Amino acid sequence: MSRSGLCQWAFVGWLCALEAAAQAPPGASVAARVEGCEGLSAAEVRRSLRVELRAHLVSPDEIEPGTTRAEARCDRARRARLRVWDPVTGKDVRRTIDLSEIPEPGRARVVALALAELVLASWTEAVTNPRPAVAPLESTAPEPERSRVRELVERRHPQLASVDRVRGGVSATAQLRVMLESPLALGGGELEGRLAWNALELSVAAGVVLASVDRRLGSVLVGLADAAAGIGLVVTTGAFRWRLTARVRVGYGWLRGSADHSGDRGGFLDGLLVGPEAVASVAAPVVWPLVPRLDIRFGYVPSGLVGTVAGEDPVSLRGAWLTIALGLDWDLR
């Protein structure tokens, strides 16, 4: 299969993963069940609970791994025994409330409010203590659900977002880099390491891109091995993770010309390339810890390499360039 064909299939696969993420629930998932509560509407409890939590309510009969379960059971003394099973923090919490003095029309609202407080109290630990000293056995929620819970808690309590949270990761991407001055397209790959503290992220990367340019009298092999380091911001919204990063890229480039029939051994040109780079990235945490990712990168090399070919356009590693990269993040927590 040709290089362009591989790129097309890789792009289609990444889009499928992105679409799966877009169809994921818009928020943290909760299943609510109400039993034995005379004169109390289960549908009204669920509706009020959804409003209070701003979460995605699912049917108690269609629970998936990672879904928090909330339950209210009433007895003849009109006491409601509340229970929450939280797979995000691995807790099973309970509370009993008295409904005997609450007018019947308001009982559903009171039960929903009490359940919401119990759920949020449990979820808050996902932000304030994301790595317990002793890991709970029941903490089985997948990472995308944990991210949605953390986002919901931090949105309701912005003061908690300042809690220090360090995390890291590595990435592997296939990239197509276009030198806009030539124009010249180079293909290759890159590895990246990341270390984040809350929304601030440091990154280092290293990779290689290559191209072979045909000319009337021969060909030119173009190569660039480079590394980059920079700092950026990371924001998670729903099923997507967005990055904006500023980096400095340093590399070693070379141009090697070869003639077809003239017997000329061709020329060789190499040198150091340095320039700024801006990266915009979106990732979709579909199956943790592997996260599909798309990068758009723009950079500039003020002083690069220019290979001249008699009677034809030069081959250049200089000026502005644009990179499209597809790959996978691997989150380390």
Image: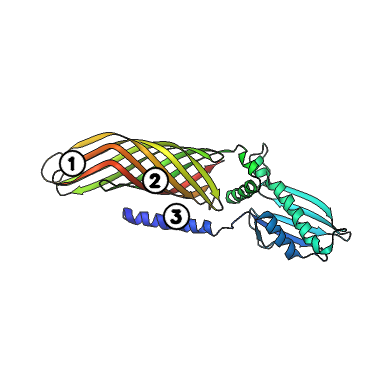
Give the quarter of the image for residue 57. Answer: bottom right
> Quarter of the image holding residue 319?
top left
Q: Which of marks 3 and 1 is in front?
A: 1
The residue pinned by badge 1 equals 308
Q: Name the residue under label 2.
A: 297
Q: Which amino acid does label 1 sit on?
A: Thr
Left or right of residue 275, residue 127 in this image: right
What residue is rendered at 66% in x and 45% in y?
157
Point out residue 135 in the picture as x, y percentages from the top left corner. 66, 41
> Which sits earlier in the primary sequence, circle 3 or circle 1?
3
Q: Label for residue 14?
A: 3
Mark 3 or 2, which is nearer the eye?
2
- Residue 99, image x, y percentages: 85, 58
Q: Where is residue 72 in the image (x, y as percent from the top left)?
A: 78, 58
Judge whether residue 288 can be spotted in this image: no
User: Looking at numbered disc 3 in the image, what kind of residue is underneath it?
Assistant: Trp
Residue appearing at x 33%, y 38% in the figure: 225
Query: Which residue is at the front of the view, 24 or 140?
Result: 24
Instruction: Answer above or below: position of 263 versus 79.
Output: above
Task: Please state the horizontal and vertical placement of residue 264, each as a whole percent of the image.
Answer: 12, 40
Q: Which of marks 2 and 1 is nearer the N terminus?
A: 2
Residues 299 and 256: in front is: 299
Q: Distance between the residues labelled 3 and 1?
A: 38 Å
Quarter of the image that includes the N terminus: bottom left
User: Split into 4 quadrants, where in the image is the C terminus?
Assistant: top right
> Is residue 279 visible in the rendered structure shown here?
yes
Q: Quadrant of residue 6?
A: bottom left
